[in-house]
Image (cartoon, rainbow, N blue to C red):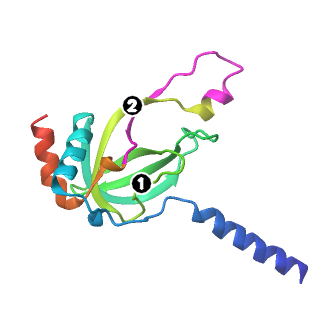
Amino acid sequence: MGSMKVLIWLLILFVCWGCHRLQVTEAIESRPWPETAKLAALTDAVNTADGYVVGTVEKAVEDWTYDRPRGGPHTYLLTIRATDGGKWYLRVFVPEGNYLPLSVGTYAVFIWRYAYVYPLLKCRAHAAATLVCSPDWLPVMGSRNDVAAPSDSALVAKLFANK
C-alpha cells in the first residue's frame, strides 16, 4: 500500500509540473483591440521585425539552452508548420510573470526578428575552459504584439511590403 501512495504522489507531481508549461489563456482572435490600437501595435512589431510566418504551432517545449533560471525570461522552442508547408523553429522569450497566447494547435501570424542569444547553459559548462561565450543568431519572438490573428495576415503582409 505504501508504494501505491508513492506512485500516486509521483503522478500528481508529474501532472502539476506539466501545468506550468505554455498554456492558452485567451484566444488570439478575441483580443478586444480597437482597430487603431491594433494597427499601431502591428506597425510597431513589423518595423522592428525581420520576417513573419503564417502557420500552426506543432510543438512547444521549454528550451533550457537559452533560459535564465533566476528571474530572466523563460524560453520556449516553437515548431511551426507554415501554411506553405514549410517548417519554422522560433524561440519565444517570455518575461517572468507574463505569457504569450500560444500552445500546440495555435494558428496565427508569427512576427519574428533575428537576435543574438547567449546559450547560457553551454556557456556555464565551458566557463572553466574559455572566457569567451559566443552568442547564436536566431529568429526570436518576445512580445504579445509578435502574434497576430490569422485574419490580420493581409495587413501584416502589407505592412512588410511598405517597410
User: Which secondary structure lies at badge 1?
Assistant: loop
Find residue 6 and report its horizontal and vertical position in percent: 83, 74
As drawn, is 74 to the left or to the right of 17? Answer: left
Q: Quadrant of the C terminus?
A: top left
Do the numbered discs 1 and 2 sit on residues whose CB atoms are within 8 Å? no
As drawn, is 143 to the left or to the right of 6? Answer: left
Query: Badge 2, how many Cα within 10 Å: few under 14, some, many 20+?
Result: some
Residue at image position (68%, 22%) is 127
Q: Is residue 156 above or below residue 123?
A: below
Name the one closer to the observer, 108 or 58: 108
Badge 2 amino acid? Ala
Q: Quadrant of the N terminus?
A: bottom right
Badge 1 amino acid? Leu
Q: Is residue 20 above or below residue 39?
A: below
Find residue 30 and report its horizontal and vertical position in percent: 28, 66
Question: How far is the residue under mark 1 from the one under mark 2?
Answer: 19 Å
As drawn, is 48 to the left or to the right of 79? Answer: left
Q: Residue furthest top?
A: 131
Q: Is residue 77 above or below residue 8?
A: above
Check if residue 95 falls in the magenta segment: no
Q: Which mark is residue 100?
A: 1
Q: Is residue 140 above or below residue 9?
A: above
Q: Which portion, as a residue range, is magenta? A: 123-143
Residue at image position (83%, 78%) is 5
- Residue identifier under label 2: 115
Check if residue 127 falls in the magenta segment: yes
